[in-house]
Amino acid sequence: MTSVQTAPRPSLAGPPVTDRLPMRSPHAERPRERMLAHGPQALTTAELLAIVLRTGIAGCDSVSMGNQLLRRFGGLRGLLCADLHALLAIKGLGAAKACELRAVSELHCRALEEQLADKQALPDAGKVKQYCAARLGHHKIEYCIALYLDCQLRLIAAEEVARGTLGQASLYPRELVKAALSHHAASVVLAHNHPSGNAQASEADINLTRHLRDALALVDIKLIDHIIVAGNHACSLMEQGYC
């Protein structure tokens, strides 16, 4: 009697485990799902950071890692202002995540620059201070930047003009005048940081401000303000009557 051979039945077990895509943690997806359902305002700061970080490390999911970073750097601003070396020193952060966090910070600064370029800077002194604090507040040495404004007080450009201990020896009036003329600026706002944490103007700051004001006035360019930044705080010499 001839036996009938049947085709092998397909296996329901699926491919070997090694061929399967790795399962993603439901907890790691939750911030994205919550944002899609309720918008970014519904998320905690740590959850927003988790979306940027995407993954955590062994024993620490992305939300927990976000909380740890906030505690380590004293809050969101400290984290976003941290330099790459400080970020890379954090276990599990890595170059990719560190660069992403610095990119978020830089995008924030550039968004503020766009606001200053689109409307008059002087009437909105709070925005100018916010920008200067975002740009300078985290530095451990003194930096000085110049904001060049057009005749309608809109930002043309923001550039570093000095680094290190600020004074007439490091910030040459002729170089500032030359740069202002090259940008066709009608006015200038100076800003520099105090790494000591004290935003109050020193006598040297006041003397330098007057010296630069007089040098710019010779070419009919007005020094509107000199802002001193210390961490989150910013002090305006214009508001104190020195400009």
Image: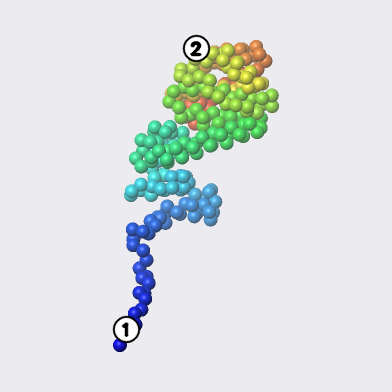
Q: Residue lying farthest bottom?
A: 1
* Tally of numbered tags: 2
Amino acid tagged 2: Ala
Label 2 sits on a secondary structure element that is loop
Q: Nearer the viewer, residue 56 or 230?
A: 56
Q: Position of residue 67 (x, y in %)?
A: 41, 44
Asked if residue 193 lies left or right of residue 93, the reply is right
Q: What's the residue at 49%, 49% (across, down)?
A: 43
Which residue occupies 47% across, 36% down? 102
x and y, in percent, of residue 191 in the image:
54, 23
Going by the picture, which residue comes out furthest to the front? 2
Q: On the image, numbered disc 1 is attached to which residue?
A: 3
Q: Which residue is the site of mark 2?
A: 169
Where residue 243 appears, as percent x and y from the top left, is 61, 18
Residue 13: which disc? none
Q: From mark 2 to mark 1, how far is it between C-alphas?
A: 103 Å
Q: From this viewpoint, is residue 184 visible?
A: yes
Disc 2 versus disc 1: nearer the observer: 1
